Image: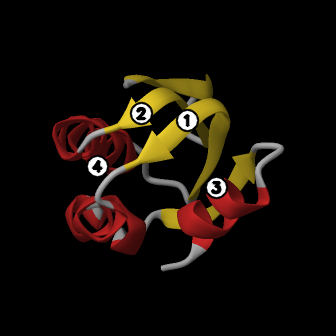
Amino acid sequence: MSYNVEWYIPERVVLLTLSGIVTVEDAVQSNKEMEEALHESTHAIFVLVDAEEMKASVPFERIRQVQTFLMHPNLRAIYVITSSKLTRLLLTVV
């Protein structure tokens, strides 16, 4: 998988771009970068997830376990961009 974590709007909106097949190792690293971004800001943060190029995620249950940034107090909301209804469901169910 390829992923990228960057500020879309500094200290307000983080853009997480996912492509290819998601692995547990990728999820661990992207989670670390998301946690760092959330800790950097004193404001509530919104996350845009661009998953248009994401192919699959295996095993999804394990990936969800390592995504600790989802419970960060600075996280306000997550918006998923994808044409796949299944991907949208998998990425938004907490």
Quadrant housing residue 53: top right
Circle 3: is it few (<14), some (14-19), or many (20+) Cα within 10 Å? Answer: some
Image-quadrant location for residue 70: bottom left
Under circle 2, the secondary element is: strand
What amino acid is found at the position of numbered circle 2 in the picture? Answer: Ile
Q: CA distance from mark 2 to mark 3?
A: 12 Å
Say which element carries label 4. helix
**Precedes in sequence: disc 1 or disc 3:** 1
Label for residue 35?
4
Tell me if label 1 and label 3 are in contact, CB under 8 Å: no
The residue located at (48%, 79%) in the rendering is 94
> How many numbered markers are drawn?
4
Q: Which mark is residue 21?
A: 2
The answer to which of marks 4 and 3 sits earlier in the sequence is 4
Q: Write down the residue under mark 1.
A: 55
Q: Secondary structure at mark 3?
A: helix
Q: Is residue 60 above or below residue 23?
A: below
Q: Is residue 77 left or right of residue 91?
A: right
> Counting residues from the N terminus, which is met first, the one under dot 4 or under dot 1?
4
Vertical side of 32 occupied by 18: above or below: above
Query: Is residue 76 visible in this depiction of the protein?
Result: no
Between 89 and 15, the one nearer to me in the picture: 89
Q: Please state which of the two labelled residues, at mark 4 or mark 1, is closer to the viewer.
A: 1
- Residue 75 seen by the camera: yes
Q: Which residue is mark 3?
A: 87
C-beta proximity under 8 Å, tags 1 and 2: yes
- What's the amino acid at mark 1? Lys
Which mark is nearer the camera, 2 or 4? 2
User: Does the CB distance between marks 4 and 1 fall below 8 Å?
Assistant: no
Lateral position of residue 78 relative to residue 79, left or right: left
Q: Identify the mark nearer the N-term, 2 or 4.
A: 2
